[in-house]
Amino acid sequence: MAVNDTIADMLTRIRNASLARQQATEVPCTKMTQNIARVLKQEGFIEDYEEVGEGIDRHLVLSLKYYGKHRKPVITKLQRVSRPGMRVYSNHKDLPRVLGGVGIAIISTSKGIMTDREARTKRVGGEVLCYVW
């Protein structure tokens, strides 16, 4: 099935897998999903990710992260902000702070995909893709 919003699809797959306490989840591989996975790993929300498959059948396998004896998911919430029907842009001064800096906002800028913190230090704005905490 063709998905128009690959980012929302990716976030939903991660959300469902972590609620089901799965070790890993598979998402279709695009440049955007690869960059979001890179930021999630960099910020410590996922263990690791790897590209599997060839050509059109490429997928990213994300290893999810849990903590404690009862395996609580590190990612408590994923929220899509900008969507194909309604884009949300922000300049570097007005970038959102997620839970007072506890969570991250993933921003698509002219200098690549990065967290709100990085975008503020590099003084670039862009499209607010999603919030993660």
Image (cartoon, rainbow, N blue to C red):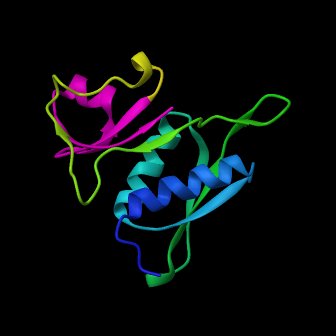
Q: Position of residue 10 (x, y in %)?
A: 48, 58
Locate residue 68 relative to residue 113 in the image: left or right.
Answer: right
Compared with 91, 127 (above or below) is below
Count numbered badges in the picture. Answer: 0
Q: Residue at x 59, y 37 (%)?
A: 75
Question: Which residue lies at the image location 41% right of the left edge and 31% below the top edge?
Answer: 104
Check if residue 117 falls in the magenta segment: yes
Name the residue rendered at 48%, 37% in the picture.
Answer: 42
Question: Residue 80: horizontal and vertical position, in percent?
Answer: 39, 47
Q: Viewed as shown, does residue 55 lie left or right of 123?
A: right
Q: Nearer the viewer, residue 24 or 55?
A: 24
Residue at image point 20% right, 28% down: 122
Of residues 19 and 93, the one nearer the viewer is 19
Q: Is residue 69 left or right of residue 81?
A: right
Magenta-highlighted residues: 104-133
- Tell whether position 91 is magenta: no
